[in-house]
Image (cartoon, rainbow, N blue to C red):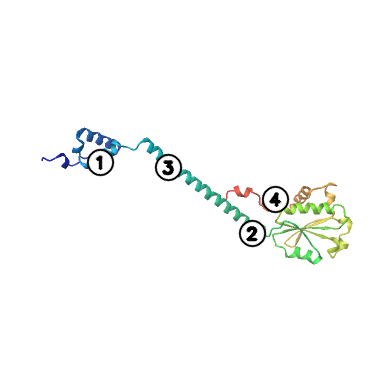
Amino acid sequence: MSGSTENEELPATQTGHKGVIHDWRRFKLESEDHDSIPPNKRELLRQMSNPKSRNEDKQEKVNRKMSMQEYEMIQEEDENCLRNYRKQCMQEMHERLSFGPTFDTVFELESGEAFLEVIEKEHCLTLVVVHIYDDGIKGCDALNNCLTCLAAEYPSVKFCRIRASATGAGERFSDDVLPTLLVYKAGELLGNFMCVTKHMNEEFFATDVENFLNEYGLLPEKEFAACPDEVENADVE
């Protein structure tokens, strides 16, 4: 059959990368006159003869790289939000389930009734440390100062103090047994230390009182009680 080159059907082409290159070369050799090339071949030849410039490819890679950077930034922000959320959940869990209420000061008990109430009605998970003291007794002021420091480091422990004369049982707490430390939990007496300063050096500090109580296992782990920043980096599965 006769007919113009324009009406000829496009020969079957090879597939794949090498096939496209072979077709392009064949189109170029077959057609010396650009106008005689069929439109479909002409378009293919144009596309194959004018690939993207290196600058365009480079710009495309930059754009792709920027997109990846943006994705990584978003991912990092999500991880920070998740970490903060986990920290908040950990703190709430410790407060509500593990350690009950939290405190940050030493409470002054004004009467024997207040003394009994803090022992019997405090949260069952709360450790209560009561310092029975009196004015002018050696070691009492120093111990009060030490408990003030420990109250800040152990917020899950309720530190209290009461004058011996205010307990309603002053005869039991004479000067020779002061200062006295009593430790309770859920209404149960865990520790009864009379003249506690005898177990320490003449000059003692909060760490000495802390070590003394820890010898009897009467203080919680400081890292949980104080809720340190290490919790932020902890992995929660």
**N-terminal-most mark, 3 or 2:** 3
Of 27 and 19, which appears nearest the observer?
A: 27
Sooner in the amino-acid sequence: mark 4 or mark 3:
3
Number of residues whose C-alpha sits closer than 10 Å to that of mark 2, classed few (under 14), some (14–19) or many (20 or more): few
Check contact, mark 4 vs mark 3: CB within 8 A.
Answer: no
Q: Position of residue 70 (x, y in %)?
A: 48, 46
Mark 2, mark 1: which one is toward the viewer?
1
- Place of residue 185 in the rendered image (x, y in percent of width and height, measured from the top left): 73, 59
Q: Quadrant of residue 33?
A: top left
Quadrant where the N terminus sits is top left
Q: Position of residue 230 (x, y in %)?
A: 63, 48
Q: Marks 2 and 1, Cα distance to the nearest angstrom? A: 73 Å
The residue to which callout 2 is attached is 97
Q: Of marks 2 and 4, which one's residue comes earlier in the chain?
A: 2
Closer to the camera, 46 or 236?
Answer: 46
Relative to 24, does residue 159 appear above or below in the rendering?
A: below
Residue 222 - label:
4
Q: Which residue is mark 3?
A: 63
Residue type indicated by callout 2: Leu
Say whether disc 1 or disc 3 marks the residue closer to the N-terminus: 1
Along the viewing direction, whichever of 217 and 1 lies nearer the viewer = 1
Which labelled disc corresponds to residue 43?
1
Three-letter code for the amino acid on which mark 3 is drawn:
Asn
Q: Nearer the viewer, mark 4 or mark 3?
A: 3
The furthest residue to the front: 35
Q: Secondary structure at mark 4?
A: helix
Mark 4 is on which residue type? Lys
Look at the image and tell me whether residue 21 can be seen. yes
Q: Earlier in the sequence, mark 2 or mark 1?
A: 1
